[in-house]
Amino acid sequence: MDAQWTSQQLQALAAMNIPVWEKTPKENQYYCYKMGAYYLVGESQLPVELPQWFKDFCLCVGERPVAVKAAENSDKCFNYDNWFDETPTATFKKELWRSLSHA
C-alpha cells in the first residue's frame, strides 16, 4: 500500500527537514545458474524438483545447475523462462540441442 500524505503531514515533514518516503521501483531480478560451460538466466528460480527431461539434460552436460551471482555475456547464455511452463515438445528439445551445439 502506498503512503498517502495529507498536506499537514507534508508540511510537518518539510518543517523537520525529513524527506518524503517514496517507494523505489523494483529492479529487474534475474536468477543465474552455471551448468557446465553454459549459463542459464531467468526471472524465477529453477524448480526445486527438476522435471525428468531437465535431469536428463543435466546428465548430458555432466553437472546440475549451480546458482551464481551473474552470468557472463556470451553465446553460451540461455534464458530458461519458458522451459518449465509445460512438458517440452520434440521441436523444443531439437531447438535446444541445436542452440547448445552451436554455443
Image (cartoon, rainbow, N blue to C red):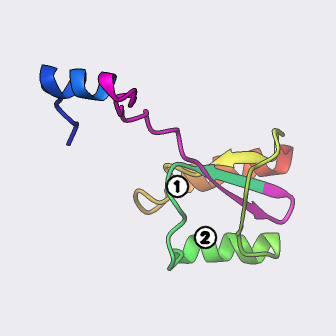
Q: Is residue 35 magenta?
A: yes
Q: Image point 43% across, 33% down: which residue?
A: 25
Left/right placement of residue 19 relative to residue 31 reads: left
The 10 Å Cα crowd at callout 1, few under 14, some 14 to 19, many 20 or more, is: some
Is 32 or 100 nearer to us in this picture? 32
The 10 Å Cα crowd at callout 2, few under 14, some 14 to 19, many 20 or more, is: some
Q: Image point 23% across, 27% down: which residue?
A: 12
Per the rendered image, the range of residues in magenta is 15-38
Q: Image point 77% across, 62% down: which residue?
A: 34
Q: Position of residue 86 (x, y in %)?
A: 40, 59
Is 79 or 87 nearer to us in this picture? 79
Name the residue type under label 1: Trp
Residue holding disc 1: 83
Q: Position of residue 88 (x, y in %)?
A: 49, 59
Q: Position of residue 8 (x, y in %)?
A: 14, 23
Left/right placement of residue 97 relative to residue 4 reads: right
Q: Going from the N terminus, do you reach mark 1 or mark 2 first?
A: 2
| Element at label 1 | loop
Q: CA distance from mark 1 to mark 2?
A: 9 Å
Picture quarter with the N terminus:
top left
Q: Quadrant of residue 14?
A: top left
Work out whether 47 lies above or below 73. below
Q: Position of residue 21 (x, y in %)?
A: 35, 34
| Element at label 2 | helix
Picture quarter with the C terminus:
top right
Residue holding disc 2: 54
Left/right placement of residue 51 relative to residue 76 reads: left
Kindly indicate whether the residue at mark 2 contacts the one at mark 1 (C-beta within 8 angstroms). yes
